[in-house]
Amino acid sequence: MKVCTICGAKWRGEPSVCPLDGGPLEDLPDPLLARTIGGRYVITERIGAGGMGTVYRARHEVVGRDVAIKFLSPDLSADETNRNRFLREAKAANRIDHEHIIDITDYGETDDGLVFLVMEFLNGQPLSELILRGAMPSFRAVDIARQMASALARAHELDVIHRDIKPDNVFLLEKHGGGDFVKILDFGLAKMKGEIRLTASGAVFGTPEYMAPEQARGAPLTGKADLYALGCVLYEMLTGDPPFDGPTPDLILKHIREVPVPPSARAAKEGRAAIPRNVDDVVMQLLEKDPERRHVDAYHLYEDLRKVAETLPRPSAIPTIRDASYEDALNAKIARPGPIPATLSSSTEAWDAKIDRFRTLARRAHGATAPGWLVGALDELERDVGSLARRRAELDRSASAAMQQEEEIRNARLRVGTAIDVLGRDESRASRQLEEIGPRLAELRAKLSRLEGPLRAAWTDLPPIPRDGQPLDPTHVARLGDAAGLATEWMAAHRGEAELADRVATLSRERDDLRFQVAQLKGRIGTLTAEGDIDLDELRERTRHADQEVQRLLDRIARSSETIVKHLLEFPELREAVQATR
């Protein structure tokens, strides 16, 4: 892409001068700047880069709002596995549709092989930047963790495991009235049930500082690996450091073998504010080596964090990401170049005015005897601009239809997802109650088993009942009392066991019914996604084709206009007039 130093219009291809005014052209610092992607996203600014790609800010021309576009690195896009893994992020996030997970609204591939995702543009900061300022108060750390648990509960219920939860992948926005609003990013390593395996069996992915023991060993993963990682993040928010440090091999071994120092002990050692015991308990349960000893699921964790939050003191002024220290940190960063404004060279209104101007200048140059080629070039340019207007209208209609379809599908999935959350919380509660009842029921059954032998023996050893008038034998009465005591104890245990068994049966039925309802809703989400993808693929293909036609016409218009401009600049008296207008 090149930019005119006079009018600022951007051009692709190899024009030697600006086709609008003949001004000198300069290469843009980034070839993607000012480029239109998918027929509706004009790239305006490069905002970051990661291991798999680069992220740009772009303007959605149909609705006039900013989005973020992530491009897969060209050196990775040649490999089909990398392309599939990159697009998996869109599929994973689209499957979930949760307020605390970044929205991915579009994805695809350009004609020249650039693979991209289109996401909501977030104005905030990564959690990792906040942690650099030091340990945060317990209530703030717990609130952030609670929102993360809410998002992971939905993801896990829909069979998506993130596998790379870490502060860099948690973004904080400012809530109205103060406080943090969490967005979980980067599902590029997510594992989805039923997908084709993209990696070799036993391959280990993730970030060592936040890696669950079973993940470090390359064992099969469940959502509890994400809970362990969330525990590491919560630990770091409370203390300023992850639970373990060191080179990667040492980190892996520590996650597998070592029990971390509780956050409260580290805070006390460093002379910082005390961390409440109930916060410590949640963190240490999340960091259990055995997944079965962690929380039942993310719903359970959410409830624990909610109860803990109710016990924590909250200041009258809720800190936000926009406090003074954050502004200082921003000001200390190296300044980025300002955003590139949207291109002016695709405006049909501007071209109509320019053609009228060209005709006026042609008459000034040649009078009534303009060369035939110039008249023909102007007529062809006018026809192409008319075609461009029609193609642009077609493109806008197609892009708007795709956007409306995306919004309808997303809203439908959100409604179903919210219902899944309600049922999932109830199912989790039933599962927790069953887990709590299990040991008590086992204890009563063991007691009944222990009492059965002595009770049978005492029963068998009972003396015959004395006849009326026959004196009672104190020894026999004592034996009868012993047997009665055993019988009373056995009956109490039996009644307790029967009540708990009945409760287990009731809870099991409730849990199974809830699981059935959740399964039905998950199937509904799958149907919505499949049906939506068919419709969206058709709309996206139509949009892509319309965009190709627009770009083809723009290239033709640019070539024709450049030829006309160069001719008019041959007349010294017209140069100022050519360059003074767009």
Image (cartoon, rainbow, N blue to C red):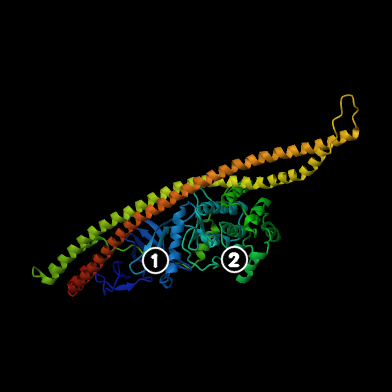
Q: Position of residue 367 (x, y in %)?
A: 10, 69
Q: Nearer the viewer, residue 93 or 510?
A: 510
Q: Position of residue 510 (x, y in %)?
A: 56, 42
State the CA–CA distance, disc 1 to disc 2: 30 Å
| Residue depth check, mark 1 versus mark 2: number of the one nearer the observer | 2
- Work out which quarter of the rendered image holds the C terminus and state it: bottom left
The numbered mark, 1 or 2, whose residue comes first in the sequence reads: 1
Q: Which residue is mark 1?
A: 115
Q: Is residue 146 left or right of residue 379?
A: right
Q: Which element is circle 2 on?
A: helix
Q: Nearer the viewer, residue 364 or 71?
A: 71
Q: Is residue 312 above or below residue 36?
A: above
Whether residue 98 can be seen here = yes
Q: Which residue is mark 2?
A: 216
Q: Nearer the viewer, residue 518 or 207?
A: 518
Q: Is residue 203 left or right of residue 243?
A: left
Badge 2: residue crowd in 10 Å (few <14, some 14–19, many ≥20): many
Q: Position of residue 315 (x, y in %)?
A: 60, 48
Q: Position of residue 240 (x, y in %)?
A: 62, 61
- Work out which quarter of the rendered image holds the N terminus and state it: bottom left
Q: Is residue 239 above or below residue 443?
A: below
Badge 1: residue crowd in 10 Å (few <14, some 14–19, many ≥20): many
